[in-house]
């Protein structure tokens, strides 16, 4: 299989041994119809030169990439699901396909799957993914990347020609297999599994692997200090990710410990939602009846998950340094929230205290105007701060912005210098309204696919999200965090 000089294979997980993952065989699908290939992401790992047939060999049949894993690995993990411990988890419909280095930052990246067939951890499930679920995940990752959120990227989506039965959507429904490019699939639940089996030796081995592969700057830390030092770094990255969700108006939906990875990158999008209006009680999952993972409780949920990870390390580490590491989450979250709000508004940061005040004022304004102001138009109207004030005060929401509810926000925003105001000359800002990704819009994209195999609206939406990404111009900066 041809690859470019930028392709740098580095299959590391398989060196850990059989206690961490199981070799599996991919499903054989009756059809292989390429619906989405992410050449922009492929270029970052030297795989953009593949023909469509070669692409299908890799991401539909999962033939091994050159000098990479000889066989896919279904990863083992446990986890808390809605805060109830479940020891019957693991990669039930996915596997780690390959590992390789990123061209620019040198990060170790994973190619992992969803819908690639049954594994030892599938239980009674079929190991498949619906095509609609794949379409939804493509949209989530494209939009989140555009908004500067640390996220996995959907790499490939292939329709498989299968008819699937599901209880939560009209069935039979079409099947698909998806591949994501992610900065690591080692989850909090990967550690929890070994704690459940009282194997501190395996926890140490996995901890050392995570440091070596993803946090090499911690490699010189002495053995006794490693658990707390790693926990502090993971907490900081998790705080950054959570703050990015909040400024993006994003609700993950299922913040279980098996859906949190060690690198602080968002992934695995099931019942996600973007906020239509500001609402701290807004939930994404219909089964989240108590609002445990609602928009306003996401930071609490992530911190709770971090505390479970800390509990794992108490098998061989002192509690006091672990508590201190956890204490770093709150200041990191609030600092990231202020800095992220400045980024989303297109203004230059003025430091932690000023940015925190701006974020508070912005959230208050969004809440006060929630009855008439959708989430995304607020950021569209005020992008680059004072450079957009005339535009905002002449637009469709001018009356609201002139009201008393927005005085505090506007006053604070005046003290900020626009960041790269030339971005406002991008055609994206000539639109009357911004690009959004609301639930009804995703359903509207799926309807023509389901009814007539019409992918035109899907492609058009991807093009509009790409235009938004180029207009905002902050996705690359937010995603280029490297620990190497």
Image (cartoon, rainbow, N blue to C red):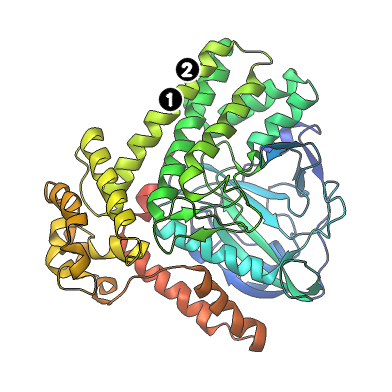
* Position of residue 24 measured from the top left corner of the image (x, y, whole percent): 83, 50
Q: Circle 1 is placed at which residue position?
A: 328
Callout 2–callout 1 Cβ contact below 8 Å: yes
Q: Which mark is on residue 482?
A: none
* Position of residue 226 measured from the top left corner of the image (x, y, whole percent): 56, 17
Q: Circle 2 is placed at which residue position?
A: 324
| Quarter that holds the N terminus | bottom right
Q: Look at the numbered disc 2 and give the secondary structure of its residue.
A: helix
> Depth check: 293 or 241 in front?
293
Question: Which quadrant of the structure image shows residue 338?
Answer: top left
The vertical placement of 294 against 220, above or below, is below
Mark 1 crowd level (few <14, some 14–19, many ≥20, 10 Å Cα): some
Furthest-bottom residue in view? 452
**Which residue does the image show at 74% across and 18% down from the upper left?**
201
Mark 2 crowd level (few <14, some 14–19, many ≥20, 10 Å Cα): some
In the figure, is residue 155 to the left or right of 126?
Answer: left
**Which residue does the image show at 64% across and 22% down from the upper left?**
311
Q: Is residue 480 visible?
A: no
Question: Which quadrant of the structure image shows residue 199?
Answer: top right
Spatial CA span between label 2 and label 1: 7 Å
* Position of residue 168 measured from the top left corner of the image (x, y, whole percent): 72, 66
The vertical placement of 78 against 206, above or below, is below
> Depth check: 161 or 168 in front?
168
* Position of residue 164 measured from the top left corner of the image (x, y, whole percent): 80, 71
> Depth check: 271 or 449 in front?
271
In the figure, is residue 258 to the left or right of 303?
Answer: right
In the figure, is residue 23 to the left or right of 109?
Answer: right
């Amino acid at each position: 299989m041809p690859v470019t000089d930028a392709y740098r294979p580095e299959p590391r997980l398989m060196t850990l041994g059989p206690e961490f993952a199981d070799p599996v065989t991919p499903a054989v699908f009756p059809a292989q119809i390429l619906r989405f290939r992410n050449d922009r992401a492929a270029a970052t790992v030297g795989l953009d030169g593949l023909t469509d047939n070669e692409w299908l060999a890799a991401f539909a049949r999962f033939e091994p990439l050159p000098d990479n894993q000889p066989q896919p690995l279904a990863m083992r993990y446990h986890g808390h699901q809605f805060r109830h411990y479940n020891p019957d988890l693991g990669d039930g419909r996915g596997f780690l396909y390959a590992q390789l280095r990123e061209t620019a930052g040198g990060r170790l990246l994973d190619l992992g799957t969803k819908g690639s067939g049954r594994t030892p951890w599938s239980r009674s499930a079929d190991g498949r993914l619906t095509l609609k679920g794949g379409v939804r995940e493509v949209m989530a990752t494209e939009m989140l990347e555009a908004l500067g959120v640390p996220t996995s990227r959907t790499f490939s989506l292939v329709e498989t020609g299968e008819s699937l039965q599901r209880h939560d959507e009209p069935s039979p429904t079409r099947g698909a297999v998806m591949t994501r490019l992610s900065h690591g699939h080692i989850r909090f639940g990967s550690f929890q599994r070994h704690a459940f089996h009282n194997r501190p030796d395996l926890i140490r081995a996995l901890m050392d692997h995570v440091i070596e592969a993803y946090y090499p700057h911690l490699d010189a830390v002495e053995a006794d200090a490693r658990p707390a030092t790693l926990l502090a770094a993971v907490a900081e990255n998790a705080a950054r990710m959570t703050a990015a969700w909040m400024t993006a108006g994003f609700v993950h939906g299922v913040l279980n410990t098996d859906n949190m990875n060690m690198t602080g990158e968002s992934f695995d999008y099931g019942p996600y939602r973007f906020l239509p209006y500001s609402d701290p009680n807004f939930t994404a999952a219909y089964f989240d009846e108590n609002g445990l993972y609602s928009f306003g409780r996401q930071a609490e949920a992530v911190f709770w998950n971090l505390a479970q990870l800390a509990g794992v390390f108490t098998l061989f580490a002192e509690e006091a340094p672990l508590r201190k590491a956890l204490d770093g989450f709150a200041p990191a979250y609030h600092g990231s929230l202020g800095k992220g709000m400045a980024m989303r508004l297109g203004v230059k940061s003025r430091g932690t205290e000023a940015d925190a005040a701006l974020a508070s004022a912005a959230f208050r304004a969004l809440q006060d105007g929630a009855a008439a102001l959708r989430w995304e138009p607020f950021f569209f109207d005020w992008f680059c701060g004072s450079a957009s004030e005339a535009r905002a005060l002449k637009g469709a929401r001018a009356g609201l912005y002139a009201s008393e509810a927005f005085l505090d926000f506007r006053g604070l925003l005046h003290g900020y210098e626009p960041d790269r105001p030339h971005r406002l000359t991008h055609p994206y800002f000539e639109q009357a309204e911004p690009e959004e990704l609301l639930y009804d819009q995703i359903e509207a994209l799926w309807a023509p696919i389901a009814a007539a195999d019409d992918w035109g609206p899907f492609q058009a939406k991807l093009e509009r999200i790409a235009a938004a990404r180029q207009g905002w111009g902050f996705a690359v900066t937010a995603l280029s965090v490297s620990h190497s």
